[in-house]
Amino acid sequence: MLSRIQNFIEVGDHNIIEIQLRFNKLPDIFNRYGTAQRELELSDDTDHSGDRELFENEYYQTEAKFSELVHPVVDKAFSIHSSRRNLSGHNNQSPRSHVSSTHMKLVVIELPTFEGDACSWLHYRDNSEALIVKNAALFNVHKFHYLIALLQNETKDVIINLQITNENYCVACQLVTQRYNNERLIAMMHAKLLCQMPPVRKGDASSLSYLINHVPSNMNTLQAFSLNVRIQDLMLNNLMLATLDTETQ
């Protein structure tokens, strides 16, 4: 996945939205690699530190290239905005303040993607609602394009037959919400994660730290739902289901 993104950068001309979407995918790639590498390191006593170092170097180089592509666009947009303010008569600031403001870098807010993982739904829903759904500067058809771009893999199938129009955007949002906004299912998935503790390798601080963060993050999410079901019952349900064959489940 990282190699494909590197090839994407090398190809050349891309619009800012496409660049931003790929850039947002980088943390997920890093986390997936960390999980896979941690499992590999726990499987034997071989020193895999060289592999991890090689990947991290490639990752940070790629992230730096993306930053170079994104920031000039932000700076240019801010400079145009500043120029228009000056031309419209808002030129009462001192030279020092003008220079400092035109060189200010805005923080890049990552657009969330969603691949169907129940535990990622709330993060996707709340962030996309704040950044896209309630963005008055966007027409519904533009929001529809964002929706399609941010839905990954099989999640697109929910709205694949809808034409991209202003009217259909609300229909698409409703279909996606009906399909994935299931708090009981999300709660069950977090309870399942609590029943499947990540392994810890002797003397490995990173895997121990991962375990320490794993428990409260899932517990806090479950408690936030305020369901009329005890967390212990959810965990017991998962333990019982694990003993059954797939068809019975």
Image (cartoon, helix red, strand yellow):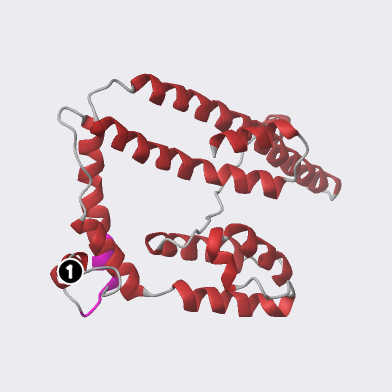
Q: Is residue 32 left or right of residue 156?
A: left
Q: Quadrant of the N terminus?
A: top right
The structure residue drawn at horizontal position 20% and vertical position 64%, both measured from the top left corner, is: 242
Q: Which residues are magenta?
A: 220-228
* Image x and y of residue 184, in percent: 31, 75
The structure residue drawn at horizontal position 52% and vertical position 55%, both measured from the top left corner, is: 112
The structure residue drawn at horizontal position 66% and vertical position 38%, both measured from the top left corner, is: 70
In the rendered image, residue 227 lying in the magenta stretch gets the answer: yes
Q: Nearer the viewer, residue 10 or 87?
A: 10
Camera sees residue 74: yes
Secondary structure state at the residue bearing disc 1:
helix
In the rendered image, residue 187 lying in the magenta stretch gets the answer: no
Q: Is residue 237 left or right of residue 101?
A: left
Q: Nearer the viewer, residue 55 or 174?
A: 55
* Image x and y of residue 185, in percent: 33, 72
* Image x and y of residue 171, in percent: 62, 80
- Amino acid tagged 1: Ile
Q: Is residue 89 above or below residue 183?
A: above
